[in-house]
Image: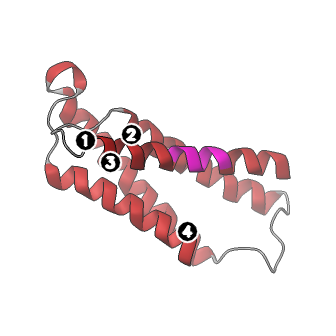
Amino acid sequence: MEILYNVFVALHFVGWAIVLGGYVASLKSPGLYRGVFHGAATALVAGVLMVGIAEMGDVWTEATAPDMAKIGVKLVVALVVAVLAFLAKRQGAKGDNGTGAVAPGLKHAIGGLTLVNILVAVFW
């Protein structure tokens, strides 16, 4: 079970890297890369599966288990980022070849909440 857990940890990290990288790469353009939504969905699903596998397979001991409040906060933030990324993908699809302009507030909310999720993971 621990190997499967570690696979989902890696997928979770890759998903958030895609979201943050796509946001940073698109800062100078009015659009947002379509891969940001896929990265957010990957990170969200991998995170849920990580917690499920860890709880089911006794990967976490009582001493190493994270606070479930932290998991809840990360889940809510990840859901919001995924929904915002989906909305940005739909908004951008109206432009040229799927990379049309996205509202700056929407775009920066995705980047900011992604950073919040990373900071909660590291410092909580």
Q: CA distance from mark 2 to mark 1?
A: 8 Å
Q: CA distance from mark 4 to mark 3?
A: 20 Å
Q: Amino acid at mark 4?
A: Ala
Q: Amino acid at mark 3?
A: Val
Residue 36 position in % (x across, y down): 38, 40
Task: Write down the residue under mark 3.
Answer: 24
Q: Nearer the viewer, mark 3 or mark 1?
A: 3
Residue 35 position in % (x across, y down): 39, 34
**Which segment is the magenta one?**
10-15
Q: Label 2, secondary structure: give it.
A: helix
Task: Write down the residue under mark 4.
Answer: 121
Residue 74 position in % (x across, y down): 50, 65
Q: Earlier in the sequence, mark 2 or mark 1?
A: 2
Q: Where, by quadrant of the figure, is residue 33 drawn?
A: top left
Determine whether 56 is above or below 90 in the image: below
Q: Report the predominant secondary structure element of the magenta stretch.
A: helix
Q: Label 3, secondary structure: give it.
A: helix
